[in-house]
Image (spheres, rainbow, N blue to C red):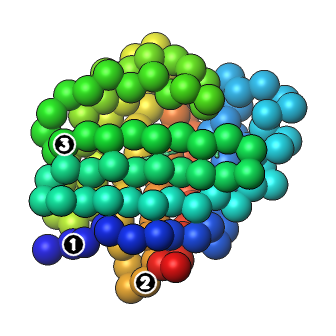
Amino acid sequence: PVDFNGTWNFVRSENFESYMLALGIDFATRKIANLLKPQKVIKQEGDSFSISTTSTFRNYFVQFKIGEEFDEDNKGLDNRKCTSVVTWDNDKIVCVQNGEKRNRGWTHWIEGDELYLELCCEDQISRQVFKRG
Ligand code: RET
């Protein structure tokens, strides 16, 4: 079974600007966010997860249990409320964020000592890679 537990440090991202544009994030925030190297701390106990994304500018925290719908506020991101649910797809965790934005969600998986994150909104996909700290 996969174990997401750990501290994960930013390595690189692709297309994050376009993802943020699709979310309607303002110019100034995008310019700052593009320069960040966020860190993720993931705590997993079976199917219960908490994921904190921290940076020098802003932080985001989310917790969920696989298969259980939860209300997500996206505070500090685009602040749009979503009804979200995360499920397993083999060794990946896949989140569907239902709300105003079409095709919104993300997928996390691990390859070796790297954590991959794909963020989707409308027709944009951003990929981020983190390395185990
Ligand atoms: C930052 C800085 C402020 C602007 C934006 C950010 C984006 C954060 C994202 C976090 C995704 C977290 C996920 C957690 C999963 O469990 C870095 C806070 C837009 C996209 C997918």
Whole-percent x and y of residue 52?
Answer: 47, 50
Give how far across and how far down residue 71 sits, in percent. 32, 22
Callout 3 secondary element: strand
Asked if residue 110 is positioned above or below residue 67 in the image, the reply reads below
Give the residue pinned by disc 2.
Answer: 113
Type of residue at label 1? Val
Tell me the distance, in whole angstroms, between the alpha carbons under discs 2 and 1: 12 Å
Q: Residue at x 33, y 49 (%)?
A: 50
Q: Residue at x 17, y 45 (%)?
A: 66
Q: CA distance from mark 3 to mark 2?
A: 24 Å
- State whether residue 114 is above or below residue 68: below
Is residue 22 at least partly visible in the picture? no
Residue drawn at x 38%, y 60% as measured from the top left: 42
Left or right of residue 24, residue 69 in this image? left
* Residue with the mark numbered 1: 2
Graded by Cα atoms within 10 Å as few (under 14), some (14 to 19) or many (20 or more), the crowding at tag 3 reads some
Q: Residues within 10 Å of mark 1 (few under 14, many from 20)?
A: few
Q: Is residue 4 toward the left or the right of residue 56 in the image?
A: left
Within 8 Å of ligand 1, the CB of disc 3?
no
| Image-quadrant location for residue 104 | top left
Residue 54 sits above or below residue 78 on the image: below
Helix, strand or loop for disc 1: loop
Q: Amino acid at mark 3?
A: Lys
Count of marks placed on residues: 3
Is the residue at mark 1 in contact range of ligand 1, meaning its CB lies under 8 Å from it? no
Question: For residue 57, which quarter of the picture?
Answer: top right
Q: Which residue is mark 3?
A: 65
Mark nearer the N terminus (1 vs 3): 1
What is the CA distance from the residue labelled 1 to the residue labelled 3?
15 Å
